[in-house]
Image (cartoon, rainbow, N blue to C red):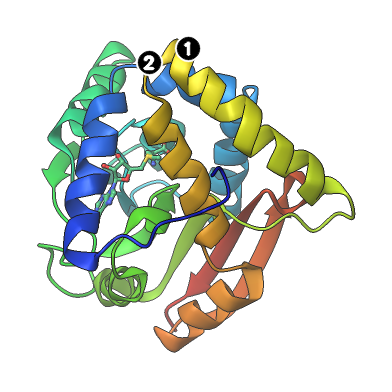
Amino acid sequence: THFGYQEVPEAEKEKLVRGVFSSVASSYDLMNDLMSLGVHRLWKRYTVDLARPRPGQQVLDLAGGTGDLAALLYKRLQPNGRIVVSDINPEMLAVGEKRLADKGMLAGVEFVEANAEELPFPDQQFDLVTLAFGIRNMTHPERALAEIYRVLKVGGRALILEFSHPRWPGLQQIYDLYSFNILPKIGEIVAKDRDSYQYLVESIRRFPDQDTFRMMMEDAGFARVDVHNLSGGIVAIHRGFRL
Ligand code: SAM
């Protein structure tokens, strides 16, 4: 049924997630716009505003495949800023690289294929780590949080944008209707891939709510964690500092 979610064995999950993003990489942008009615652009813009990137800073954008956040960060880090765009999926990274190249935004930008749960970077490298719509798909989100904390400089901050749980009364019902009926249909018609979008919907439902995720960040060591609900909590930004 639409509501029945089958537990995915852990070992399989990473492979499954790779598969989902490989199969959607090419139609990903169009799908993002359709699925969110274009609003994902505002959510990302808000995240970058809240991150307050400054000239010369070192930024890591995790699961940054599409290059969307990097493109928003780019000008604000000039001159001398550096962005590392990292993603587990080389096809998604290629999408991002092309996008940034088209915008003439490659100076100081690196693309690194890596699992966010096991980052190939030394400790305390980055002023800012961003992660948009990626942690939900990770096998061990708490490992990713520990890694983010490890690579942040003292005084640095992490911003995690992810689907969350609607907070407005009545919104959950409308959202369910949309998620379980309309969205998989859009996936079927546009991306010809109903299953991948079905999986995305289910992963959103299973992901911890705002308070639980805030506690997970605190457990990873983050201080002054705050939560910014957007669109009634359909998505939330969790921001935390390494002090
Ligand atoms: N951040 C981009 C955005 O908001 O447009 C892309 C989001 S996309 C929904 C999720 C991304 O997470 C995919 O590019 C996928 O390859 C990546 N991803 C999934 N699991 C990952 C992991 N363990 N480590 C790094 N990236 C991962």
Query: Which amino acid, by three-letter code, is at mark 2?
Result: Lys
Q: CA distance from mark 1 to mark 2?
A: 5 Å
SS of the residue at dot 1?
helix
Query: At 23% across and 66% down in the image, what residue appears?
Result: 10
Name the side, left or right, on which 136 lies relative to 89: right
Near mark 1 (Cα within 10 A), the count class, few <14, some 14-19 or many ≥20, is few
Q: Is residue 101 visible?
A: yes
SS of the residue at dot 2?
loop
State the residue in front, 42 or 208: 208
| Relative image position of residue 34 (x, y in whole percent) | 57, 19
Q: Which residue is mark 2?
A: 192
| Relative image position of residue 22 (x, y in whole percent) | 21, 31
Query: At 69% across and 33% down in the image, what residue appears?
Result: 178
Name the side, left or right, on which 85 lies relative to 121: right
Q: Quadrant of ligand 1?
A: top left
**To which quarter of the image does residue 128 belong?**
bottom left
**To which quarter of the image does residue 36 belong?**
top right
Query: At 57% across and 64% down in the image, what residue appears?
Result: 238
| Relative image position of residue 201 (x, y in whole percent) | 52, 43
Give the label on residue 189, or none.
1
Near mark 2 (Cα within 10 A), the count class, few <14, some 14-19 or many ≥20, is some
Whether label 1 touches label 2, CB < 8 Å = yes
Quarter holding the C terminus is bottom left
| Relative image position of residue 65 (x, y in whole percent) | 28, 36
**To which quarter of the image does residue 122 belong?**
bottom left
User: Mark 2: is the Cβ under 8 angstroms from ligand 1?
Assistant: no
Query: Which amino acid, by three-letter code, is at mark 1?
Result: Ile
Q: Is residue 53 visible?
A: no
Query: At 30% across and 77% down in the image, what residue appears?
Result: 146
